[in-house]
Image (spheres, rainbow, N blue to C red):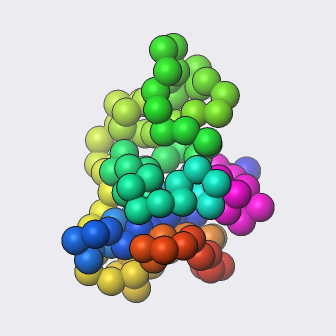
């Protein structure tokens, strides 16, 4: 069974970009990854730029042989890049509340420009 979550980032243009995350969205899994590997404005924005994520992992790179059906351990799996799905890009909103209204899940994560926080959906 999956634990769905949303990941939102307040970007340098003042707008919020949000994506859906399908697996393991509970704080014990996502917070160490977000705070350990996506803990800067640059990395947070790179993460959401790739759109909805099936599996969040330590890296957003795409090593040789990595795919949705054959993921490489330690590498995130994205619906668009790794499976070729459409309509899975990040959504742009003018407020965090707008992100929640559009993509509220069991857990919701926010990069506020300085740090990651989470809330229960």
Residue 11 picture quarter: bottom left
Residue at x 77% of width, y 61% of height: 28
Quadrant where the C terminus is found in the figure: bottom right
Residue at x 58% of width, y 20% of height: 70
Residue 119 image position (x, y, % from top left): 62, 80
Whether residue 70 appears in magenta in the rendering, the answer is: no
In the displayed structure, would residue 6 be above or below residue 46? below
Q: Nearer the viewer, residue 114 or 93?
A: 114
Magenta segment main secondary structure:
helix
Whether residue 26 appears in magenta in the rendering, the answer is: yes
The magenta-colored residue range is 23-33
Residue 59 image position (x, y, % from top left): 55, 38
Residue 58 image position (x, y, % from top left): 61, 42
Residue at x 59% of width, y 76% of height: 117
Is residue 95 in view from this perspective? yes
Residue at x 33% of width, y 51% of height: 49
In the displayed structure, would residue 90 be above or below residue 79? below
């Amino acid at each position: 069974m999956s634990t769905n979550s949303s990941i939102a980032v307040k970007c340098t243009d003042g707008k919020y970009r949000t994506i859906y995350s399908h697996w393991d969205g509970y704080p014990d899994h996502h917070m160490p990854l977000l705070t350990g590997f996506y803990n800067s404005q640059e990395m947070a924005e790179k993460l959401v730029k790739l759109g909805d994520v099936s599996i969040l992992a330590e890296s957003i790179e795409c090593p040789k042989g990595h795919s949705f059906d054959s993921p490489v351990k330690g590498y995130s799996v994205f619906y668009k890049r790794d499976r070729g799905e459409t309509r899975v890009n990040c959504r742009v909103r003018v407020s965090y509340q707008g992100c929640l209204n559009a993509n509220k899940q069991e857990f919701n994560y926010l990069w506020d420009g300085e740090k990651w926080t989470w809330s229960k959906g």
